[in-house]
Image (cartoon, rainbow, N blue to C red):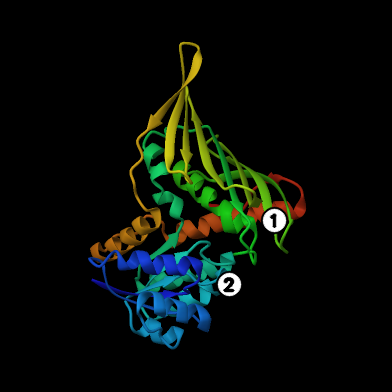
């Protein structure tokens, strides 16, 4: 079994802690560190665990480091863990810059450790319900709208929310990006809060993505169009269904969705991959690639123009 330590026990970190406790067959012990004394005290009281006194102390005491700290700290925390030959789970986005993610990938290869990025929608049961039926998808439409909660406003909505859908598109199509157009706006924070992007892939598929963190109601849906069918995944409500033409009208067919906690599933998968010495399904390279596209979208928003993509990081 594995000893795991959680770096960062804010809102999401506490959820990680709870779910890790539900996986005793994989994780024999759980520890944590957070520089915020208030958050650390709350976690200690909730889980009955005394916090480690530093990042280094946590890293020294575990086999796996679960990084749920602020995005700006991802690189330093992960690099420190990897240099000490610890496996790393890094919440998305992998890092703040491509230079940082490139460095982590190099360090991980040298240390021969496993790393996984927390692109949770790969494990969402509403996506898994339709994944195997998606063949030659020609058009993808995604809406990811969150109520404003004030978290993660230190980064753009593109790397905060839209990056989930970017990762799904890249993993599903296994194609390179040919062209991007995008626009967005700041509304309630100092970074872009609402954005739309059109991504054209070299296999002919086109994706239209919308992300907002100032919505009144949450929406997380993706529509996959292909010949004679449309599959829809409702990530928020864990529902999936297909639309098809029958008797000259569109008919809806519900698709069974398993009751699976996506975050627990991805933490379980990562631990299993480590023990079996298998490459995790969402690699550090996958996280790098999604970040590369997110950065291009953000640059297009700044420029207010669109054009061809020529970037070796997408290859």
Helix, strand or loop status at disc 1? helix
Badge 2 crowding class, 10 Å Cα cut-off, few under 14, some 14 to 19, many 20 or more, is some
Q: Residue at x 72, y 59 (%)?
A: 188
Q: Is residue 287 visible?
A: yes
Helix, strand or loop status at disc 2? helix
Seen in the picture, residue 96 relative to 170 is either above or below; the reply is below
Q: CA distance from mark 2 to mark 1?
A: 19 Å
Q: Given the current orientation, which residue lies at the most extreme right position?
A: 304
Q: Residue at x 51, y 77 (%)?
A: 76
Query: Disc 1 marks which residue?
Result: 299
Q: Position of residue 249 (x, y in %)?
A: 50, 15
Q: Given the current orientation, which residue lies at the most extreme top position?
A: 247
Left or right, residue 178 beside residue 278: right
| Image quarter of residue 280 | bottom left
Q: Position of residue 302 (x, y in %)?
A: 74, 55
Query: Disc 2 marks which residue?
Result: 72
Seen in the picture, residue 284 relative to 309 is either above or below; the reply is below
């Amino acid at each position: 079994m594995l000893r795991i330590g959680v770096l960062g026990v804010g809102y999401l970190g506490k959820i990680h802690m709870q779910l890790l406790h539900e996986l005793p067959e994989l994780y024999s012990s759980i520890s944590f560190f957070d520089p915020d004394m208030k958050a650390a005290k709350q976690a200690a009281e909730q889980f009955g665990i005394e916090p480690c006194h530093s990042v280094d102390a946590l890293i020294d005491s575990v086999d796996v480091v679960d990084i749920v700290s602020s995005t700006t700290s991802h690189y330093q925390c992960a690099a420190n863990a990897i240099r000490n030959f610890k496996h790393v789970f890094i919440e998305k986005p992998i890092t703040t810059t491509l230079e940082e993610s490139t460095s982590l990938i190099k360090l991980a290869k040298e240390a021969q450790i496993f790393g996984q990025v927390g692109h949770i929608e790969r494990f969402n049961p509403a996506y898994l319900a339709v994944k195997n039926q998606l063949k030659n998808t020609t058009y993808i439409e995604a809406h990811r709208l969150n109520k404003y909660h004030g978290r993660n406003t230190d980064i753009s909505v593109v790397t905060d929310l839209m990056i989930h859908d970017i990762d799904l598109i890249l993993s599903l199509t296994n194609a390179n990006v040919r062209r991007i157009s995008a626009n967005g706006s700041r509304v309630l924070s100092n970074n872009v809060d609402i954005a739309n992007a059109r991504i054209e892939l070299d296999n002919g598929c086109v994706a239209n993505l919308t992300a907002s963190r100032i919505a009144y109601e949450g929406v997380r849906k993706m529509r996959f169009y292909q010949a004679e069918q449309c599959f829809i995944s409702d990530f928020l409500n864990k529902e999936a269904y297909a639309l098809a033409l029958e008797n000259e009208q569109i008919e809806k067919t519900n698709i069974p969705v398993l009751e699976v906690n996506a975050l627990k599933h991805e933490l379980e998968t990562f631990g299993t991959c480590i023990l079996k010495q298998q490459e995790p399904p969402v690699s550090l390279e996958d996280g790098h690639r999604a970040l590369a596209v997110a950065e291009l979208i953000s640059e297009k928003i700044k420029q207010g123009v669109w054009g061809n993509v020529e970037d070796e990081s997408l290859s």
